[in-house]
Amino acid sequence: MYLCKNCYMDTEKSQEFYKRLKEQLRDSNEWPSKYLYKFIVPSEPEKIERIHQIFDNTGAVIESKQSKKGTYTSISITVMRENPEAVIQKYIEVGEVKGVISL
């Protein structure tokens, strides 16, 4: 299982980053494979709900844990993905939610 570290960047850098990630995923996993996503999200219900919607109907197991002060929520998502492109597509979708950090 491969974990993406800091999957958020400007467009040019992100294209290069995702290309490299795709190669790493191809080399490190057999596909289809379970994949673990981890996100840090501001503890705003609409942002947390949006992440849930992105993974709705995928069979994902979603676990959430709020920070001690309640400012942020850690979201871990384990889901079966068909290929590296499917992994990256979800990172791109989640990346559109303002304030989310991908780990």
Image: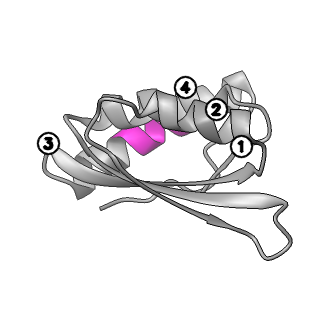
Question: Which secondary structure type mostly characterizes the magenta part of the structure?
Answer: helix
Name which of mark 1 and mark 3 comes first in the sequence.
3
Label 1: few (<14), some (14–19) or many (≥20) C-alpha neighbours in 10 Å: many
Q: How far apart are the two marked residues, 1 and 3, measured between alpha carbons?
A: 26 Å
Q: Is residue 16 visible?
A: no
**Magenta segment:** 16-22
Q: Which residue is mark 1?
A: 100
Q: With respect to residue 78, does 98 lie above or below?
A: above
Total marks shown come to: 4
CB contact under 8 Å: marks 4 and 1: no
Residue 2 spot, x, y in % from top left: 36, 59
Residue shown at the point (55%, 28%) measured from the top left: 92
Residue 33 spot, x, y in % from top left: 18, 49
Name which of mark 1 and mark 2 comes first in the sequence.
2
Quarter of the picture containing the C terminus is bottom right
Based on the displayed image, in which of its 4 quarters is residue 93 positioned? Answer: top right
Q: Which residue is mark 2?
A: 95
